[in-house]
Image (cartoon, grey):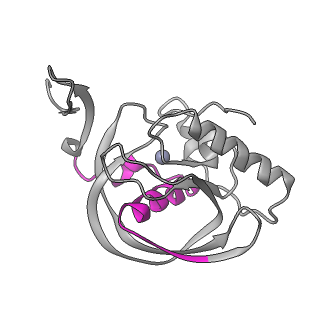
């Protein structure tokens, strides 16, 4: 049970860009990594996904919470682990909200598949073959990208699609494009 330090862009870009290796077997070390990923994710409210390279472990393991809405603060499921996740089908590309624990306070709009079929191993080491739809597909796609050193800013087509969020006078969140004031 350890909350690990999350590597941040740009200071840890080298580590975040490194490709991760396939896991040979889901053994106690891999289960320990999964436990650390869950603890680290749970330490961040509103976080719905984390990939092993973000805590400087270059193995193909990610955790995702399913059932999250795209931008609302809804209820979502508990974190589940995907080991060696492999995309075997992707489609229905759409523009959606994106953000990342390695980029605190930065958000963007990216185009990602809203239909994804993924194979891999679950945390018990059993093979799975699952379909993710809607924002679940976005989250799974974002996390799998991390295993290949791909970051969400790479999928932002226009700098005007990157923004921070501040609260207005009524306490409502409003988007502030990072290009504003320049
Ligand atoms: Zn991320």
Give the x, y percent position of residue 159: 23, 43
* Residue drawn at 26 percent across, 53 percent down: 157
Give the x, y percent position of residue 87: 52, 73
* Residue drawn at 35 percent across, 66 percent down: 134
Q: Is residue 74 above or below residue 102?
A: below
**Start-end of magenta stretch:** 129-158
Give the x, y percent position of residue 178: 23, 32
Q: Is residue 40 above or below residue 143?
A: above
Question: Observer-nearest residue: 50 or 60?
Answer: 50
Q: Is residue 123 above or below residue 40?
A: below
Q: Is residue 153 magenta?
A: yes
Q: Is residue 113 left or right of residue 101?
A: left
Q: Is residue 33 left or right of residue 13?
A: right
Give the x, y percent position of residue 12: 56, 33
Q: Is residue 44 above or below residue 53?
A: above
* Residue drawn at 66 percent across, 58 percent down: 60
């Amino acid at each position: 049970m350890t909350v690990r330090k999350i590597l941040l862009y740009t200071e840890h870009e080298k580590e975040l860009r490194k490709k991760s290796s396939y896991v040979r077997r889901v053994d106690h070390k891999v289960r320990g990594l999964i436990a650390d990923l869950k603890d680290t994710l749970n330490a961040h409210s509103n976080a719905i996904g984390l990939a092993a390279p973000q805590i400087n472990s270059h193995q193909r393991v990610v955790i995702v919470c399913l059932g999250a809405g795209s931008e609302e603060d809804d209820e979502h499921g508990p974190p589940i682990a995907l080991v060696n996740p492999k995309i075997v089908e992707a489609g229905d590309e759409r523009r959606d909200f994106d953000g990342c624990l390695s980029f605190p306070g930065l958000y963007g709009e990216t185009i990602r598949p809203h239909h994804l079929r993924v194979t891999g191993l679950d945390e018990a080491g059993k093979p799975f073959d699952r379909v993710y739809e809607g924002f679940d597909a976005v989250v799974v796609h974002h996390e799998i990208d991390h295993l290949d050193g791909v970051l969400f800013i790479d999928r932002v087509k226009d700098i005007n699609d990157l923004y921070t969020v501040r609260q207005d006078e009524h306490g409502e969140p409003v988007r502030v494009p990072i290009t504003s004031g320049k």
